[in-house]
């Protein structure tokens, strides 16, 4: 089955193709079809690979992490505008960060939930508090005694005599 193709080409190229078709004794459409077939046979590896379709940004929240990583690579390799590309990459990165944050929160709450609860003995707690109070009071009395000895020392008779001699 044949299909009809319409091309917009420069006038100079059109005239060159028309002259070549006249030289070879074929129609212009036959020449163009043969040239297209020849280029297809020579360079089959230069065909564009089908680009995998990108997911809609609204679906990013539902995708697993491995698919989000693949989507990030596909977005980086597309030929869309930089603003759109940046926007999509930011949305994907936000979903990845949210996933990791959620992972940390869930693991922390599970760890807290399975933490063994230690039972506190009230009598032991009261005895520790009383012992602490006793030690603190003893330390305060010791400090008061030391400060009295160091701060105030009455002058001896000898000190008074030396001071009187220095004044005269």
Image: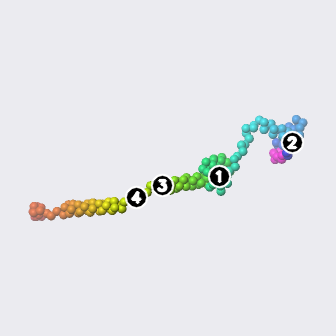
Q: CA distance from mark 4 to mark 2?
A: 93 Å
Q: Which mark is residue 85?
A: 1
Neighbours of disc 2 within 10 Å: few (<14), some (14-19), many (20+):
some
Q: Choose the circle earlier in sequence order: 4 or 2.
A: 2
Q: Residue at x 85, y 45 (%)?
A: 3
Decide if residue 63 is on the left or right side of residue 157: right
Label 3 belongs to which residue? 114
| Mark 1 or 4, nearer chain start | 1
Q: Position of residue 59 (x, y in %)?
A: 65, 55
Classify mark 3: helix, strand or loop: loop
Residue numbers of the magenta segment: 5-11
Q: Residue at x 51, y 53 (%)?
A: 107
Q: Mark 1 or mark 2, which has the lower sequence index?
A: 2
**Residue 54, magenta (yes or no):** no
Which one is closest to the eye, mark 4 or mark 2?
A: 4
Secondary structure under tag 2 reads helix
- Is residue 20 found left or right of 148 in the rendered image? right
x and y, in percent, of residue 155 in the image: 13, 63
- Report which residue position mark 2 lands on: 29
Residue that carries the numbered disc 4 in the rendered image: 119
């Amino acid at each position: 089955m044949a299909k009809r193709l319409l091309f917009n080409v420069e006038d100079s190229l059109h005239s060159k193709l028309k002259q070549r078709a006249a030289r070879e004794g074929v129609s212009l459409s036959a020449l163009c079809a043969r040239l297209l077939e020849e280029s297809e046979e020579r360079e089959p590896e230069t065909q564009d690979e089908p680009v995998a379709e990108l997911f809609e940004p609204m679906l990013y929240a539902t995708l697993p992490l491995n698919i989000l990583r693949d989507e990030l690579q596909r977005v980086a390799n597309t030929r869309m505008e930089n603003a759109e590309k940046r926007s999509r990459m930011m949305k994907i990165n936000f979903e990845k960060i949210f996933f990791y944050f959620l992972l940390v929160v869930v693991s922390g709450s599970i760890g807290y939930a399975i933490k063994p609860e230690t039972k506190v003995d009230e009598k032991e707690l009261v005895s520790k508090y009383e012992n602490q109070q006793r030690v603190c009071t003893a330390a305060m009395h010791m400090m008061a005694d030391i400060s009295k000895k160091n701060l105030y020392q009455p002058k001896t008779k000898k000190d008074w005599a030396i001071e009187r001699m220095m004044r005269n």
